[in-house]
Amino acid sequence: MEFFFIITLLYPAYSGMAYFTRKGTVTAKPGETRQDLFNKILASVHSSVDEPGIRQANVVFFSLEANELLVTV
């Protein structure tokens, strides 16, 4: 199943603190939990963002919801 996520981090930067937000989709494999997907998304941010201090970031916002919209006519 595909999920849409938004994650915002607060991390130490040169001039104090900075925010980083990423949004996108992630697909859950059978048996994966919300925590598994959170850890996968956070690891992806840590490995792909070239910002000093990003590994010391605090998560200030995280949302994970089914990407499919249920529309009734």
Image (cartoon, rainbow, N blue to C red):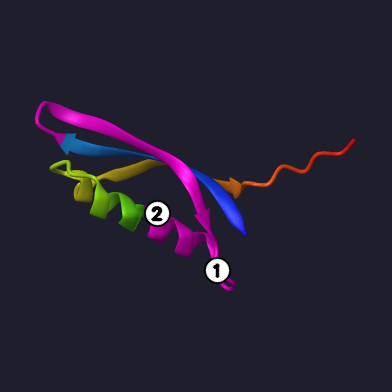
Q: Secondary structure at mark 2?
A: helix
Figure check: 57 above or below 19 = below
In this rendering, position of residue 17 left or right of residue 40: left
Figure check: 29 above or below 11 = below
Which numbered disc covers residue 59?
none
Which numbered disc covers residue 41?
2
Mark 1 and mark 2 lie on one chain; the one further toward the N terminus is 1
* 29 falls in the magenta region: yes
Q: Secondary structure at mark 1?
A: loop
Q: Residues within 10 Å of mark 1 (few under 14, many from 20)?
A: few
As shown in the figure, which amino acid type bears the numbered disc 1? Lys
Q: Residue at x 11, y 26 (%)?
A: 15
Q: Please report the bounds of the magenta region as a residue range.
A: 13-41
Q: Residue at x 39, y 60 (%)?
A: 39
- Identify the residue under disc 1: 29
Q: In front: 13, or 21? A: 21
Confirm or deny contact between disc 1 and disc 2 (CB under 8 A): no
